Image (tube, grey):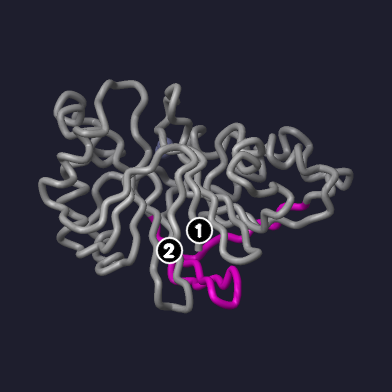
């Protein structure tokens, strides 16, 4: 499986980093995880074709994770294809309303979206080898994290936006790869304590990831509204976490 980071930033984009979204490719299967702006161009830049997308996984419906959905479907309006959209019931309802605002569920739109609400313990088979499960998260009423497993062996998790969550880290104990909210170094969370309810700082992430024995940690969703260097992020994570660490740039990819 190859995961490409179409964006690695938080809600405020920078010159280098746009809003976080991921592309998951396994054989012919192609899924987009969250849908901020410009994904058609980004998917092409990453070497894939938007018309080969089969699924969209929505972590939650904050604008930086979903505002590009109408544009994606509009750009696929001549393609006779079906996209499965997975998310919480709140995300599904929101996405339906968002598409209806632009009349993007009418017959003239050849690209159909099939909505699949994820139940907490439900296992969805995306391909014969690739399974998807989800877990509710506290960041937003629509929030879920995603757990992918290849042949029930290799396990990959994506937290979406989240405050530090002990339940999530219990669930991912020993996981091969965890992609996690790492919005800023801890000093910003001391300056703005309300951030602790919504996001995770680098120091806490390193501590929880080490405790959960995660084999490979990928921090992302870096804030663009405050100034810090990646060195600061890495040093804070490394204060506790001593296993494999990959800090992605936009268009970085990892093979799992
Ligand atoms: Zn976000
Ligand atoms: Zn959010």
Could you say whether the residue bearing mark 1 is in a helix, strand or loop? strand
Residue on which the image places disc 2: 256
Q: Residues within 10 Å of mark 1 (few under 14, many from 20)?
A: some
Gap between marks 1 and 2 measured at Cα: 6 Å
Q: Position of residue 86 (x, y in %)?
A: 57, 57
Q: Which mark is residue 44?
A: none
Q: Is residue 204 rendered to the left or right of residue 171?
A: left
Q: Is mark 1 within 8 Å of ligand 1?
A: no
- In percent of width and height, residue 233 lies at 22, 37
The part of the chain drawn in magenta is 112-136
Question: Is 225 included in the stretch rendered in magenta?
Answer: no
The quadrant where ligand 2 appears is top left
Left or right of 209 in this view: 103: right
Q: Nearer the viewer, residue 237 or 45?
A: 45
Is 234 situated left or right of 48 in this image? left
Q: Secondary structure at mark 2?
A: loop
Q: Is residue 94 above or below residue 113?
A: above
In the rendered image of this protein, does residue 137 appear above or below residue 185? below
Q: Hey, which residue is sitting farthest left in the picture? A: 239
The answer to which image quadrant residue 188 occupies is top left
Location of the C terminus by quadrant is: bottom left
Nearer-N-terminus badge (1/2): 1
The residue identified by callout 1 is 2
């Amino acid at each position: 499986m190859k995961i490409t980071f179409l964006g690695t930033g938080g809600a405020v984009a920078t010159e280098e980093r746009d809003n976080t979204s991921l592309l998951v490719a396994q054989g012919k299967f192609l899924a987009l995880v969250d849908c901020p702006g410009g994904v058609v161009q980004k998917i092409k830049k990453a070497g894939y074709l938007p018309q080969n997308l089969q699924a969209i996984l929505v972590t939650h419906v904050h604008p930086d994770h979903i505002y590009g959905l109408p544009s994606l479907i509009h750009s696929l309006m001549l393609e006779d294809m079906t996209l499965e959209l997975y998310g919480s019931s709140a995300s599904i309802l929101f996405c339906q309303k968002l598409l209806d605002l632009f009349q993007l569920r009418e017959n003239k739109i050849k690209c159909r979206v099939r909505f699949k609400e994820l139940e907490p313990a439900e296992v969805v088979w995306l391909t014969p080898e690739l399974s998807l499960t989800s877990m509710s998260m506290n960041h937003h009423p629509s929030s879920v994290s995603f757990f992918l497993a290849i042949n029930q062996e290799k396990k990959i998790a994506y937290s979406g936006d989240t405050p530090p969550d002990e339940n999530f880290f219990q669930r991912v104990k020993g996981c091969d790869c965890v992609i996690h909210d790492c919005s800023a170094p801890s000093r910003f969370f001391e300056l703005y304590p309300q951030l602790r309810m919504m996001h995770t700082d680098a120091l806490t992430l390193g501590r929880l990831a080490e405790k959960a024995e995660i084999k490979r940690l990928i921090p992302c969703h870096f804030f663009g509204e405050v100034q810090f260097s990646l060195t600061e992020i890495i040093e804070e994570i490394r204060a506790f976490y001593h296993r494999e660490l990959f800090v992605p740039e936009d268009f970085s990819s990892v093979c799992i």
